Amino acid sequence: MVTTPGRDTSARGGDAALYDEAGQARFDELIAEDKRIEPTDWMPDDYRKTLVRQVSQHAHSEIIGMQPEGNWITRAPSLKRKAILMAKVQDEAGHGLYLYSAAQTLGTTREQMMDDLISGKAKYSSIFNYPTPTWADMGSIGWLVDGAAICNQVPLCRASYGPYGRAMVRICKEESFHQRQGFEILLHLMRGTQEQREMAQESVNRWYAPALMMFGPPDADSPNSAKSMAWNIKRFSNDELRQRFVDMLVPQAEVLGVTLPDPDLKWNEERGHYDYGELDWDEFHEVLKGRGPMNAVRLERRRTAHEDGAWVREAAAAYASKMAARDERIAS
Ligand code: BYC
C-alpha cells in the first residue's frame, strides 16, 4: 500500500490523514463497476464530504418537514385523517433518523449535524419554508412534495454509498404511501363542494412552483451535480428529474381535475415531454438565504424542540452509563 501523508483523504473524519493509492484504485474500480462503497472502504475525502453534505441536508429536510404537516394534526377534519397524518409525520421522523445514522457512518456526529441545523448553518429543503394555511395543503404536500421527493429519491436507492442507498429503499416505500394519501385528500376535496374544490386549487397554485424547485437549480447553475453523477451518487441531473416530475404530474392533475398554474405548460411532440414555464429562481435563492416566508419560524421551532428535549438526552446518557457500569461490574 502506498500512502502519501498530508492529504486528508480518510473515510473517518478524525483519523490520520493519508492518501491511499491502492484505496483510490479500489474506489475507482468499484465506482466504474457500479458497485457499492461501504463505510469500512477507503474513500476520497471529497466523496465523503459530498455525502455528508447531501445526506445531512436530506435528514434535516425530513425533520424540518415534520412541521408544516404537524401544524394540522390537531385540526385534521376527522379521526381517520388525523391518524393518517400522525403516522405520516412519524414516518418523516423515522426517515430523518435513518439518514442521520447513514451520515454518522461517514464520520460526522449527530451533535455536529444538529448544531449546524439549529445554528442556521446547514441547509434543508427549500420547500419547507412555505406556510400551510389550509387543510388542502396536506393534500398538496403529499401529492406534490412527496411526489417530487419520490422522483428524486428512487434513483438515490442506487446511490453508490451503501448506507445511503439502503436507507432510501425503505424511505421510498413510505414516500409512495405518502404521495397517494396526498392525492386522495385532493381527490376527495375535488369531488366535494365548490368551496372545497376552490380550496384544493388554491393550494395547488401555491405549492406547484416551489415543488418544481425542490430538484435544485437548473443544471447550468448546479455546482455539485457533475461530481455527484461521476461518483454515482446522483443518477440524473436536476433538470432531468424536474422534467420527469412535470411529465408525471400532468395526467394526474387531469384525473384530479385541478389546473397546474403554468400557462406555458404544453406537450412538445418533438421532445416527447411537456414544456413548462421559467421558474422564479430569485425566490429560490431568497429562501436558501433564510428569507423565505417561514424560515425563521421553522428554525425557531426546531431550536425550542431541541432545548425542550435536553432532559431526554441527559436521561438516555445517564441510563447508558449506568448500564455500561453494570456490564463492567458483571464482567469483572
Ligand atoms: N433546497 O449543486 P446543486 C421530503 C442547494 S424531504 C435547499 O444542484 P446537489 C419530505 C444545494 O444543497 C426531501 N437547498 O446541489 C420530508 C447546494 O448547496 P450546498 C429532501 C437546495 O446536492 C417531509 C446548492 O443549492 N430531499 O421528501 O447536487 C415531508 C446547489 O445545488 C435545494 C433531499 O434532500 C433545495 N431544494 O443537488 C414531506 C434529496 N436544491 O450544499 C416530504 C437528496 C439545491 O453546495 N438531495 N440546493 O451549499 C439531493 O438529491 C440533492 O442534494 C439536490 C441538490 C437535488 C437537492
Image (tube, rainbow, N blue to C red):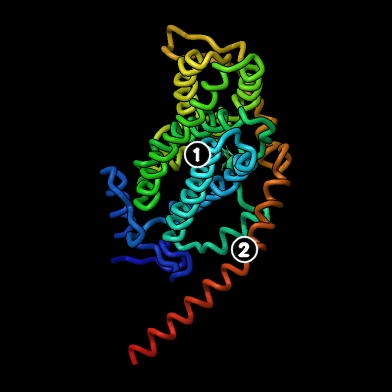
Give x and y (percent) for residue 1. 28, 66
Q: Mark 1 points at which residue?
A: 84
Residue at 46% over, 28% down = 241
Disc 1 vs disc 2: which is toward the camera?
A: 1
Residue 267 visible, this orientation: yes
Q: Nearer the viewer, residue 311 or 16?
A: 311
Query: Is 280 placed above or below 44 here?
Result: above
Disc 1 residue crowd, few under 14, some 14–19, many 20+, Cα 10 Å: some
Q: How many marks?
A: 2
Q: In this view, does 45 lie to the left or right of 306?
A: left
Packing grade of label 2 (10 A; few <14, some 14-19, many >=20) is: few
On screen, residue 245 versus residue 157, left or right, reads right
Numbered tag placed on residue 51 in the rendering: none
Q: In this view, does 174 lie above or below 316?
A: above
Vertical order, 321 against 135 (above or below): below
Residue at point 65% right, 17% down? 198
- Observer-nearest residue: 330 or 251? 330
Q: Earlier in the sequence, mark 1 or mark 2?
A: 1
Q: In which quarter of the image is residue 325?
A: bottom left
